Amino acid sequence: MTPPSARPSEPAAATVGGSAASGSEAPLLDVRDLRYRYPGAPVDALGGLDLTVTAGEFVAVVGANGSGKSTLARLLGGLERPAGASLAVACGCDLLSEEGRMAARREVGVLFQNPENQLVAECVEDDVAFGLENLGWAPEAIRARVDEMLERFWLTDLSRREPHLLSGGQKQRTALAGVLAVPRRVLVLDEPTAMLDPAGRAEVLDAVHGLRTGGLAVVYVTQEMDEVVGADRVVALEAGSVVYAGGVGGLFGDVALVRRLGLGLPAAGELALELAAAGRPLASLPLTPDELVTALEGAR
C-alpha cells in the first residue's frame, strides 16, 4: 500500500497518495488507552485500546461482530470523538479536539463496506473529482489527478458511467479512487469486500494490494481471514480490547484463540486441520493455496 499529503495547489505527481514520509519515525497513527461508548450503551465499545501504525505498514484488524472494529475505523478517521485517551494522534492531529479531527480527515481516508454511501456525483469521473473540487484545486490539476486515478483503478472506460449502473466491484473501486484522489497518508478500509460477490471482491483486493508500493499506511478491517494473509501485522479485537497483536502466523497458529474469537482460518489452514483430523497431519500450518500444495508434496 502507499502515500502522504500535498497542498491543494501542489498535487502529487504519479502517486496514489502524496509526497513520501519526511523521514520521521513517529507513527502516523498512535492511540493509547483509547475509549469510546455509544450513547445509552451500558459498556464501552472500545475500552483502553492501544495501536500504532507507521508509514508504509499494512495492518489488518480482525474480530467478531461487535468487537469494536468499525468503531476503531471511524475514530482513526476523525469521524467520531473518543470518550477519552491518554494519546490519540493521527498524522500529527489530535483526535481529542474538534480541530484535530477535522485536520485528520484530510490526511486519513476511510472506505466503508457500502460504496453507495460514498458515491455522490452523476458519473464516475465527477465522483473522483468531488473531494479535489471541495479543496479548491485548479481545474487543470483536478483533470490530471482524476485521469491518474481512473487509470490506476481501471475506471477509464467507465468515466462517464452513472454510479448506479456499475457492478459492486466497480462501485467500490470508484469510491476508493475518490478517497485517494485527495493525497492521503493513511487509508482505513472497513470491510471493503463485505457486500461484494466473489468477482467484485477479487477486483477490490487487486486494487488494494496494488497500493503497496510507497509510504501509505493501511489499516484493513475484515472478517475474511484469507484477506489477512500478507499483512505486516494483525490486531485481533474482543469486546473492544486488543487480545492479539503480532504476526499473521502467530495468530493463526493459536487455533484455540481463533475459535474463541469466532473467527476462522484461511481456507488452506482449515483444509489442513481437516486433513489432520482425518489422520494426515502436515508439518506446518499452510495459510495460502501454494503453501498447502507445498505441504502436501512434503507429506508424501
Image (tube, rainbow, N blue to C red):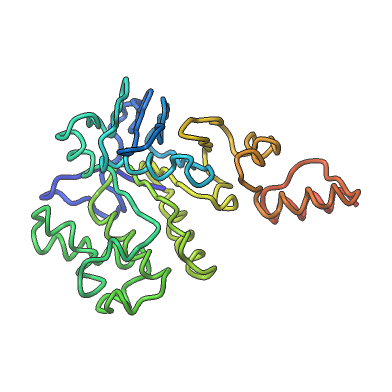
Q: Is residue 131 left or right of residue 166?
A: left
Q: Going 59% across and 50% down the picture, which residue do you hit?
A: 225
Q: Going 77% across and 55% down the picture, which residue do you hit?
A: 293
Tell me residue 249's x, y (percent).
64, 38
Does residue 30 lie above or below 157 as drawn? above
Tell me residue 296's x, y (percent).
82, 53
Q: Which residue is more in the foreground, 289 or 239? A: 239
Q: Which residue is more in the foreground, 181 or 71? A: 71
Tell me residue 111's x, y (percent).
35, 53
Q: Is residue 133 left or right of residue 284?
A: left
Q: Going 61% across and 46% down the picture, which residue do you hit?
A: 263
Q: Is residue 147 left or right of residue 229?
A: left
Q: Which residue is more in the foreground, 231 or 76? A: 76
Q: Going 31% across and 29% down the picture, which residue do you hit?
A: 23
Task: State the residue lying farthest toward the top.
Answer: 86
Q: Which residue is more in the foreground, 178 or 271? A: 271
Q: How many marks?
A: 0
Tell me residue 10's x, y (percent).
14, 48
